[in-house]
Image: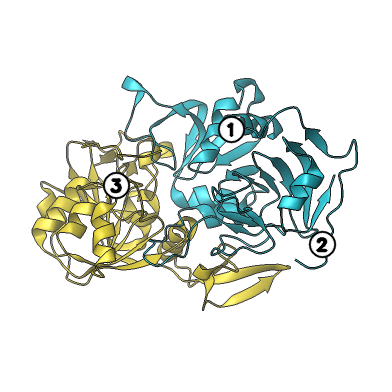
Chain colours: A yellow, B cyan
């Protein structure tokens, strides 16, 4: 039995994250980034982390702050280099962080596979490119595919918009991005939301992440940033 | 290149616009917008291709997909319409149109790989005459690689158009016999839209279908690829 727990603080929500853990961090740029959970994780002190996220931090907040604190050994992401990714860029150029670039759709589908109990899958993305080198390939129905393995997290830190008291979640606009997939793919899924409503308030037809995937919820006032230099 | 099949343009087959110079990137964006079928589901890559959106008339009913999780994307948001929870794939704040839908990343990329997206328009460093695409990594020492959704888009959309200048600033053709940069996808591009010409590429090689400022045969002279005209 692992019903979602509604916690008072972000510090309680991230308690127990071990050194060396694999942490899935939601967000696409700043949209959907769980800023408050990451700040709590920095206070909590876990180090030597492997982070899975679409980007490798923007500006000085959120994931960039975790990187700047020296807690991350390796980043798996699709798009590290951006106008405001200077924290990651400096660590990478100094050889202080490992990078594995994964095509964005593979990043999502590999986590989906982890959450859905799929052992591996054949995917047409990246066939014939550097990112498929050394991977098993198979021709199916005249098309080439590459074997891709799941990415499972020990923890997922994600940001939703509204939760009900049992842990059903809805998101807001494109801040949804990786949240629903990451929620399924981690042993412990930790969610920050702007709003918590009583059970029975969310329309069951509109729930995006059912409560079975959610372990810890904390309500925080939403903080928003936009990516500087985006074009 | 050996076995060059460069031929002169046949009148009436290649459309040559010789009374003007090469297209500006805005003119090129307008040209691409005219070629996108009404009602199509379309993804515009980050950077240059986003210009195409400015030239799509609302009446065409084209529905824009953005890979961070939305169909029905509207124009860039300004002023009070800026909502940090609503951005495009380049992380620029955008708006939603009536009929928009949001979805998570696994669904967003299933739409590509599953063959549901009609057209995507991508930028490129190089395209080969057989439709190989290089647009994600220069491969230079010290360069930080970043692929985003480019590899998924390249193999997923039914038609992959590339929008780019035909030559680098140094005058080197970007349409090449074989890409020197690391590949994004193999044989995935169907057509390149450039300031000087629209050229179809694929297993049958490159074929010029429209030019601006130069006739097809003059353009073929500047390109070191197998090229048919018309």
Residue drawn 60% across and 27% down? B56
Q: Nearer the viewer, mark 1 or mark 3?
A: 3
* Disc 3 chain ID: A
Disc 1: CA contacts within 10 A as few (<14), some (14-19) or many (>=20): many
Residue drawn 62% across and 38% down? B41
Asked which secondary structure carries label 3, the reply is: loop
Q: Name the residue beneath numbered marker 2.
A: B4
**Residue A108 sits in which quadrant?**
bottom left
- Tag 2 and tag 1, C-beta contact below 8 Å: no
Residue drawn 42% across and 42% down? B90
In percent of width and height, residue A227 lies at 31, 40
Mark 2 or mark 1: name the one nearer the start of the chain: 2
Residue A125 visible in the picture: yes
Asked which secondary structure carries label 1, the reply is: strand
Q: Nearer the viewer, residue A196 or B80?
A: B80
Q: Name the residue beneath numbered marker 3.
A: A84
Disc 3: CA contacts within 10 A as few (<14), some (14-19) or many (>=20): some
Instruction: Please indicate whether residue B165 sits to the left or right of residue B93 in the image.
Output: right
Rendered-image quadrant of the C terminus of chain A: top left
Residue drawn 41% across and 66% down? A114
Instruction: Please indicate whether residue B137 sits to the left or right of residue B206 in the image.
Output: left
Q: Name the residue beneath numbered marker 1.
A: B63
* Disc 2 to disc 1, C-alpha distance: 41 Å
Instruction: Please indicate whether residue B91 sits to the left or right of residue B173 in the image.
Output: left
Q: Name above or below for residue A202 compared with residue A55.
A: above
* Disc 2 to disc 3, C-alpha distance: 46 Å
Q: Nearer the viewer, residue A14 or A82?
A: A82
Disc 2: CA contacts within 10 A as few (<14), some (14-19) or many (>=20): few
* Disc 1 to disc 3, C-alpha distance: 30 Å
């Amino acid at each position: 039995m692992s019903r979602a727990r509604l916690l008072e603080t972000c510090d309680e929500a991230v308690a127990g994250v071990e050194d060396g853990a694999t942490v899935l961090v939601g967000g696409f740029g700043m949209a959907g980034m769980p800023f408050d959970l990451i700040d709590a994780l920095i206070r909590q002190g876990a180090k030597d982390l492997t982070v899975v996220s679409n980007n490798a931090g923007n500006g000085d907040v959120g994931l960039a702050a975790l990187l700047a604190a020296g807690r991350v050994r390796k980043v798996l992401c699709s798009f590290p280099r951006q106008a405001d990714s200077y924290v990651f860029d400096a660590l990478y150029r100094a050889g202080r962080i490992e990078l594995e670039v994964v095509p964005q759709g593979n990043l999502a589908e590999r986590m989906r596979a982890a959450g859905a109990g799929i052992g591996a899958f054949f995917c047409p993305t990246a066939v014939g490119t550097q990112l498929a080198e050394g991977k098993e390939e198979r021709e199916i129905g005249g098309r080439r595919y590459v074997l891709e393995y799941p990415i499972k997290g020990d923890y997922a830190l994600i940001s939703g918009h509204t939760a009900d008291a049992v842990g059903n979640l809805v998101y807001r606009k494109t801040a949804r991005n990786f949240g629903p997939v990451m929620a399924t793919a981690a042993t412990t899924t930790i969610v920050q939301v702007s709003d918590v409503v009583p059970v029975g308030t969310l329309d069951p037809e509109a729930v995006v992440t059912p409560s079975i995937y959610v372990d810890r919820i904390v309500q925080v006032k939403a903080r928003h940033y936009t990516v500087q230099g985006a074009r | 290149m050996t076995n060059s099949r460069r031929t002169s343009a046949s009148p009436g087959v290649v459309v040559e616009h010789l009374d003007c110079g090469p297209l500006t990137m805005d003119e090129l964006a307008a040209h691409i917008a005219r070629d996108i079928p009404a009602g199509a589901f379309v993804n515009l890559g980050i950077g240059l291709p986003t210009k195409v959106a400015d030239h799509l008339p609302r009446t065409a009913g084209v529905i824009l997909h953005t890979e961070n999780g939305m169909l029905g994307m509207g124009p860039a948001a300004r002023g009070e319409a800026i909502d940090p929870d609503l951005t495009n794939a380049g992380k620029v704040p955008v708006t939603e149109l009536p009929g928009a839908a949001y979805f998570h990343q696994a669904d967003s990329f299933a739409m590509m790989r599953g063959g549901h997206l009609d057209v995507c328009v991508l930028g490129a460093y190089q395209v080969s005459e057989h439709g190989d695409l290089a647009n994600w990594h220069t491969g230079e020492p010290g360069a930080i690689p970043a692929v985003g959704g480019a590899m998924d888009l390249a193999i997923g959309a039914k038609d992959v158009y590339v929008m780019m200048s035909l030559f680098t600033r140094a005058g080197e053709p970007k349409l090449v016999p074989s890409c020197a940069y690391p590949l994004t996808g193999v044989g995935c591009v169907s057509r390149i839209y450039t300031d000087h010409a629209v050229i179809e590429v694929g297993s049958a090689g490159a074929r010029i279908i429209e030019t601006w400022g130069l006739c097809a045969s003059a353009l073929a002279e500047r390109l070191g690829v197998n090229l048919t005209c018309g």
